[in-house]
Image (cartoon, helix red, strand yellow):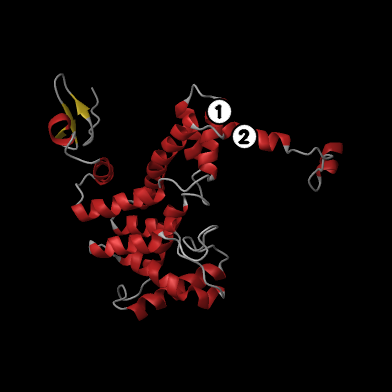
Amino acid sequence: MPEYPTALGASSLDRITLLGQDLAADVMGEVGFGELAFWLATQRRPTPGETRVFEAVLAALADHGFTPTAITTRLTYLSAPDSVQGALAAGLLGGGSRFLGVTEDCGRFLHDALSTARGGLPTDEAGWDELALASVRSARAEGRVIPGLGHHVHKEGDPRTPRLFHIAAEEELVGPHLSLFAAIGRIHPQVLGRTLPLNGAGVCGAALADLGLPLELLRAFALLARTAGLIGQLAEEIRNPVANDIFLSVDRGNRAVPPHPADGGEASASG
């Protein structure tokens, strides 16, 4: 019989183990959910400082108002109230390059920029600024967006960003990704010709990368955080529904117009 080794959950007749621990005796009531999520992903128990930074990231990304993910969850619940899982899944599927996915995009951007450092990582602010300037100029020359810069609401500064920098500094967990991200905040006006805020999703990606979490899972942690927020959106929708009003505002506000084929549509149709 084939074997499928795992260090995660396993069950016997009278015992469940998780990460080598007795689930009932050693985990339940002893390990917080944020700590456990980190532990599951890395298979090493985080330090208290790492847990604090990680849970600060989860809190930062849990909910941000009536974003597309929240609206989608509420509308899906309106359409299918028998499928809570469908409503949650619909919202999570909207976690992409504009919402939530910036966490992963920023972490990867910083990681790639760090890999270009010659002679080791910078040791002072001037060195970080030089590396940041090179990375931003390179991205702009290639027509790429700088992830983590700008916010559609917090145009004067995202309040989550300085707070997460502060928490990481208190726990002595400001690593190369956060250092480079801070430098991008200082130097980007030289390249872009305007000043943009460092947004919360970006700083979360930098913090997660500094914790040593896999780049492939950075978006997954953002989705983990948003799951809690979407549960809150559903709970509020049940108590104080607004999804039907959102639906009706669009339905009643629609305006019929003549068909407008895309360029080449008529030629294609005529064969």
Give neighbour class at mark 2: few <14, some 14-19, many 20+ (Cα, 10 Å): few
Residue drawn at (40%, 45%) of the image = 62
Residue 78 numbered tag: 1
Q: Amino acid at mark 1?
A: Leu
Asked which quadrant contains residue 160, the reply is bottom left
Q: Is there any visible trace of residue 138 in the rendered image?
A: yes
Residue drawn at (45%, 55%) of the image = 105
Is residue 247 found left or right of 127 in the rendered image?
A: right
Residue drawn at (21%, 28%) of the image = 10
Label 2–label 1 contact, CB within 8 A: no
Eyeballing the image, is 44 above or below 269? below
State the quadrant of the C terminus.
top right
Q: Amino acid at mark 2?
A: Asp
Q: Secondary structure at mark 2?
A: helix
Residue underneath mark 2: 245
Position of residue 189 measured from the top left corner of the image (x, y, whole percent)? 51, 75
Along the line of sight, the residue nearer the viewer: 111 or 269: 111
Give neighbour class at mark 1: few <14, some 14-19, many 20+ (Cα, 10 Å): many
Upstream in the sequence, badge 2 or badge 1?
A: 1
Asked which quadrant contains residue 165, the reply is bottom left
Q: Residue furthest right?
A: 270
Count every numbered label the image shows and give the total: 2
Along the line of sight, the residue nearer the viewer: 4 or 25: 25
Q: Is there any visible trace of residue 271 in the rendered image?
A: no
Position of residue 203 measured from the top left corner of the image (x, y, whole percent)? 39, 60
Is residue 168 found left or right of 81 in the rendered image?
A: left
